[in-house]
Image (tube, grey):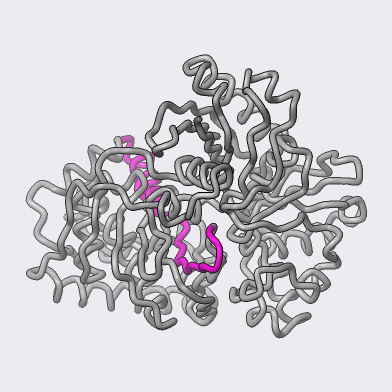
Amino acid sequence: MTYLGLDIGTSGVKALLIDGQGAVIGDATTTLNVSRPKSGWSEQNPADWWQAVTDAIDLLKGKHPNEVAAIKGIGLSGQMHGATLLDGNDAIIRPAILWNDVRSDAECRELEAALPTSREISGNIAMPGFTAPKILWVKKHEPENFSRIAKVLLPKDYVRLLLTGRYVSEMSDAAGTLWLDVAKRDWSEALLGATGLDKSHMPGLVEGSEVSGTLKKELCQRWGIEGQPVVAGGGGDNAASACGIGAINPGEGFVSLGTSGVVFVSNEKFSPNTGGAVHAFCHAVPDTWHQMGVFLSATDSLNWLAKLLGAEAAALTSQVAEGFSGPGEEIFLPYLSGERTPHNNAKARGSFTGLSHLSDAKTMTQAVMEGVAFAVRDSQRVLADAGTDIKTLLAVGGGSRSELWLEMIATNLGMEIAIPQDGDFGGAFGAARLGLIAATGAEPASVCTMPKIKKTISPRADLKSAYDEQYERFRALYGAIEEARNQ
C-alpha cells in the first residue's frame, strides 16, 4: 500500500508518494505562475491548479506505475487564504485572490468595525492576506461577482472538489479564512455575516487526519489505481509541514526560511495574541492548535538583492560567511511586501540604513540575512508574550541551507536550531502522512514523528551582546521610519 501527498503551492504543485512505513518512493513537480494585474494584487486561475495536479500525478505514474496503482490514501496541503469563488454550477467566477494580495487593507478595518468581537472569535487580527477581507473587497468593487457566489473554497479544497466531488475543508486551513471560531473548531455565523455570507457558502469541516471523501472512479481509472483511495482532510501548508517534520506536540516547532518566513509552534490549547499579530490556528491533527509568527519576505529579501546585484543568492551568502565576525553598520528592514508579525502593516516597506562608502555586496547581503534573523526574533518575542515556550526548533526551507544564517537566528533566539538529515519534510510529505493516517486509522503521533537530526546549530555566546544591541536598533527603526513616512 502507498500514500500520496499533494501540495498546491504558489509557484508549483508537488506530488509525493510514500510507502506504509513512511519512506519516500518518489515525487513529481509542476510549475504555476502568478498574475499581478495591479500593484499589490496577486492572483491565479484555479483551473491552473487542477492542470498542475493532474500533470504531476501523470508524471508520478510514469515513473512509478505499480506504486501509484497501490495508493490507498491521499492527503492535501496547500497555500492558505486564497479566495476561490464558485457559482451554483461550480464555475470559477473570477481568478483566485491569493495569500500575498494586499488590496483589501481597508476592508480589514471595516470588518473589525462591523464586528468588534472578531479578534476574540477568530483569535487573529483581520489582515489583507486572510480570505474574509478579500470577499468584502469583491462585495464592494465587484458586486456582480459577489452576487454569484455559491461557495468559497481554499486552493487545496478546490482541488479536493475535483478529486472527490465534495465541498470539504479542514480545521488548519479554515482557521486562516477569518471565518472560523478557532476555539470551537467550527464556522462562525457572526464572522460570516460580517462579510455577507452564511454557512451555506462554506464547505463542510473535518480534521486533517480524517476522511473527507474518496477519489472519483474516473480518476482511479485514469491513473490505474486499484479501488478508490480515501482523501484525508490534509492541512494548510504550514500545518502540513509540521506533520511532515513531526511538530505536533506542545512546544515543538520549526522555523521556515522560504519565500516568506514562519516561526511555528504547536499548542495544547487555543492561545491567541492579536496584539503581537500572532496567528493562532487549529492544527491539522485533532485537539491541537498552533501559533505562527509570519514575516512575508524571508528568502524573497535575499533573492531581491541578488537580482539587483546580478548575482546568485548562494554565492552572496557564501561570501558573507568568509571572515564573518558579527553585525556591521548596515541594517535592513525586510518589509518588501508589507509585514504581518508583529506589525500587521500591509504598507510597510523595506529599507537599508547605515550605508557608507564601505558598503558593498557583502555587507548588504549580511544586513539582509540579519534583518530576516531579527524578523524571526520578533516572532519569538510575541509568541513568548502569548505565554508560549518553544522547546524544540527545527529548520526547514531553502534558506536553511545556509548554516551561517541559522547561526545568526540561533544567536538572536538564544536557543539551538536542529537541521534534519537530508530529506523532504514539507507540505507534500506531511499531506502523505495525513493520507496514511486517514486510510489506516493510525494514531497521528505514531506517524508524524521527527526526523533524524544531521546537525545542531548553537548560539554564538561571543556575539550575543552585539546582536542584542543591533536588534534594539532594528526595532527602533521601524517606528521612526513609519512616523516619518506618515507625516
Q: Quadrant of residue 186?
A: bottom right
Q: Is residue 109 above or below residue 4?
A: below
Image position, residue 445 (x, y; %): 42, 57
Q: Nearer the viewer, residue 306 or 439?
A: 439
Image position, residue 396 (x, y; %): 34, 49
At horizontal 59% and vertical 74% (from top left) the residue drawn is 124
Left or right, residue 248 beside residue 116 = left
Residue 294: in magenta span: yes
At horizontal 34% and vertical 76% (from top left) the residue drawn is 389
Left or right, residue 320 beside residue 292 = left
Q: Nearer the viewer, residue 59 or 464?
A: 59
Image position, residue 352 (x, y; %): 34, 61
Name the quadrant of the C terminus: bottom right
At horizontal 58% and vertical 33% (from top left) the residue drawn is 72
Q: Quadrant of residue 372?
A: bottom left
> In this view of the protein, can residue 167 be seen by the observer?
yes
Q: Is residue 290 above or below residue 70?
A: below
Q: Is residue 222 above or below residue 104?
A: above
> In this view of the protein, can residue 10 be seen by the observer?
no
Q: Quadrant of residue 248?
A: bottom left
Residue 65: in magenta span: no
Image position, residue 266 (x, y; %): 43, 67
The count of marks equals 0
Left or right, residue 126 beside residue 115 = left
At horizontal 51% and vertical 17% (from top left) the residue drawn is 66
* Chain part drawn in magenta: 285-311
Residue at the front extreme of this rendering: 441
